[in-house]
């Protein structure tokens, strides 16, 4: 049964997108894989062109603009470090090499003329943050691979789309090389000019507090749409350059607070990403995909096995990128939503101009699906194979807690778990440092704090201070890195019940409710200690379990039933006067 009501269709699409993204998060796979599968599965029931008419591609373009603004807002100059030269080469020399190789193989395996082959090749340059950023969250590669992939993935979108529109314009208007080069300059020049102009105006308005707090996010979103529209009026697809520049300006300025604006766009971007992939997937003619399957697979093979390695080698030769990172970068060549969106839009424009778009859409769609699948299922393996993956996150951040937190950190470190202290007093900081324990001393609301949590592989946070505003604020900041389901602590139910109900985050207590932070602090001062035992020894009376530790993965499990642990797993306990780690003494 085909859905004919636009509102019903939009509701179904958003629900399906959210479900697919939730499933991908649970399975720790890139959401694009599930979104494309849902889009294809929905194609018999959804006809986006019929439902949304001429507004479809306008909405797709605006959605891509918001995603590129979000991506640009994550690019900070100070984070690029030694990746600067490889990134510049990848989005220039590497893009040209990829274009040439993709165009050649397209002309050889498809029955298309040279102009259409060049157009398909230009579109297949595009990668994009919609694929790369979710991959980075799952794979967690070390530097400089992480920065190179992040910067390349975001900057290549406007580069590829801008080049593709020039090729399309040249194809339709039969322009010469000089005119084509002028179009490239004017396209990127218009986007750069508009993006910089809008960013200066908005940032200054924020600095001078000319915009009320409750309107700052709304106005910034309107500016993103406005800059995209104005730049596109000056030159088609210059809007993608404009919004990327606008996002980068927000990321690198220090004149006005903008974290809340960027955070809103991240949440909006997740919704837009899901809707775009399902809508574009539903537009694909599956029969056309099947008819062009073999040529499409050949193009995928050439892009992955020839074009990407050649582009990476040419872009990293003579730089500080070592062989391990170079080989890893050669294995990642996913195409994203911008490639699919541009292909769909250009097919319509070619058709309106009386030019047969041929297999443009099904081939690009198949390449997107194929390269995303290869990257999604193979990137983690490649990162481990070439030894560029960070260790699996298993760290614990301890907020306050004094001697009890220091004792807990001691046992966690002995068991092979990374820890870091947050919010200790000066005296406790010195005591922790004397034992070789990491202590964070900077601002909790800074970018450096989130970066430190990510670099250390912090997976969970435990609030132990008993100072409500410190605990909740620190947990709120760490939740952006680990997720709210990984937050724990000690809480006084008589004081916190109403407060917790009104909070966005809701931490789980690691001890029974009667063990408030004040009581645990008093017990610690009275000689109560923390110890580690193997799970099979955990039944001794007078000891309460704080957490379990998987002996194979070293993952920490708070609020776990000791009976559910394997005999050789570890349990950290609190109890009267004993702090010796029996499990390790026996070994």
Image (cartoon, rainbow, N blue to C red):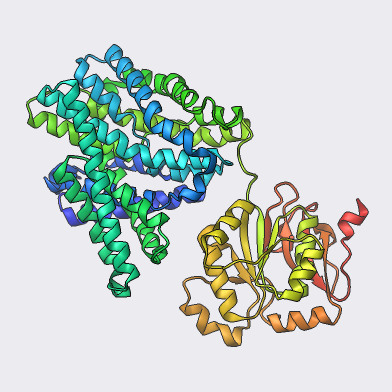
Seen from this angle, which residue lies furthest right? 586
- Where 337 sits versus 217, above or below? above
- Residue 198 on image: x %, y %: 25, 56
Quadrant for the N terminus in the image:
top left
Figure check: 539 above or below 192: below
Q: Single out the residue that lies furthest toward the bottom.
A: 494
What is the x, y in percent for residue 345?
19, 36
Mark yes or no: residue 470 visible: yes
Q: Is residue 312 above or below residue 236?
A: above
- Quarter residue 234 falls in: top left
Is residue 282 in view?
Answer: no
Residue 509's x, y, as percent?
Answer: 63, 73
Residue drawn where x is 39% and y is 29% of the image: 370
Residue 366 location in percent, x, y?
Answer: 33, 28
Question: Toward the viewer: 238 or 28?
Answer: 238
Determine whether, in the image, residue 448 is placed left or right of residue 271: right
Q: How many marks?
A: 0
Residue 473 vs residue 570: left or right? left
70 with respect to 580 (left or right)? left
Q: Residue furthest top?
A: 108
Please determine whether, in this image, residue 189 is positioned above or below residue 228.
above
Q: Please tell me which residue lies in front, 168 or 544.
A: 168
Q: Nearer the viewer, residue 294 or 235?
A: 235
Looking at the image, which residue is at 66% across and 80% down?
513
Which residue is depicted at the point 27% across and 66% down? 218
């Amino acid at each position: 049964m085909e859905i004919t009501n636009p509102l019903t269709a939009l509701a179904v699409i958003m629900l399906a997108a959210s479900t697919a993204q939730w499933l991908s998060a649970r399975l720790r796979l890139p959401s694009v894989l599930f979104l494309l599968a849902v889009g294809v599965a929905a194609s018999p029931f959804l006809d986006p062109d019929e439902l949304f008419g001429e507004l479809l591609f306008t909405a797709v373009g605006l959605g891509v603009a918001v995603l590129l603004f979000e991506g640009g807002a994550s690019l900070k100059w100070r984070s690029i470090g030694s990746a600067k030269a490889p990134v510049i080469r990848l989005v220039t020399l590497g893009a040209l090499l990829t274009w040439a190789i993709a165009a050649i193989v397209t002309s050889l395996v498809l029955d298309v003329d040279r102009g259409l082959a060049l157009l398909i090749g230009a579109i297949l340059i595009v990668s994009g943050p919609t694929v790369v950023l979710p991959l980075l969250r799952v794979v967690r590669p070390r530097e400089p691979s992480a920065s190179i992939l992040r910067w390349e993935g975001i900057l290549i979108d406007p580069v590829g789309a801008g080049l593709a529109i020039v090729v399309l314009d040249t194809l339709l208007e039969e322009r010469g090389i000089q005119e084509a080069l002028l179009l490239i300059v004017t396209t990127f020049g218009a986007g750069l000019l508009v993006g910089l102009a809008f960013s200066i105006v908005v940032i200054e308005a924020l600095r001078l507090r000319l915009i009320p707090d409750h309107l700052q996010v709304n106005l910034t979103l309107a500016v993103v749409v406005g800059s995209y529209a104005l730049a596109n009026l000056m030159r088609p697809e210059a809007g993608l350059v404009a919004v990327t520049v606008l996002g980068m300006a927000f990321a690198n300025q220090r004149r006005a607070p903008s974290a809340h604006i960027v955070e809103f766009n991240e949440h909006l971007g997740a919704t837009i990403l899901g809707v775009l992939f399902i809508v574009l997937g539903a537009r694909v003619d599956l029969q056309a995909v099947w008819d062009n399957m073999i040529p499409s697979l050949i193009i995928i093979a050439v892009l992955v096995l020839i074009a990407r390695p050649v582009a990476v080698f040419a872009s990293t030769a003579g730089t500080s990128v070592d062989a391990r990172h170079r080989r890893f970068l050669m294995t990642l060549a996913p195409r994203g939503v911008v490639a699919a969106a541009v292909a769909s839009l250009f097919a319509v424009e070619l058709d309106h101009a009386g030019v047969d778009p041929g297999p443009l859409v099904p081939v690009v769609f198949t390449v997107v699906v194929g390269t995303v699948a290869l990257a999604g299922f193979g990137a983690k393996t490649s990162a481990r194979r070439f030894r560029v993956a960070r260790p699996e996150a298993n760290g614990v951040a301890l907020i306050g807690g004094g001697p009890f937190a220091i004792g807990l950190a001691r046992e966690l470190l002995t068991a092979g778990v990374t820890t870091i202290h947050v919010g200790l007093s000066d005296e406790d900081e010195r005591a922790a440092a004397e034992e070789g324990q990491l202590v964070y001393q900077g601002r909790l609301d800074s970018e450096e704090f989130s970066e430190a949590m990510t670099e250390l592989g912090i997976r969970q946070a435990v609030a132990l201070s008993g100072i409500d505003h410190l605990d909740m604020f620190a947990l709120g900041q760490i939740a952006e890195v680990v997720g709210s389901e990984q937050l724990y602590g000690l809480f006084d139910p008589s004081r916190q019940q109403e407060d917790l109900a009104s909070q966005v985050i809701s931490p789980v207590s690691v001890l029974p409710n009667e063990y408030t932070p004040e009581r645990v602090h008093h017990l610690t001062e009275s000689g109560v200690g923390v110890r580690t035992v193997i799970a099979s020894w955990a039944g001794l009376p007078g000891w309460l379990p704080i957490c379990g530790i998987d002996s194979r993965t070293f993952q920490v499990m708070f609020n776990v039933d000791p009976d559910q642990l394997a005999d050789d797993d570890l349990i950290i306990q609190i109890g009267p006067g004993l702090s010796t780690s029996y499990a390790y003494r026996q070994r």
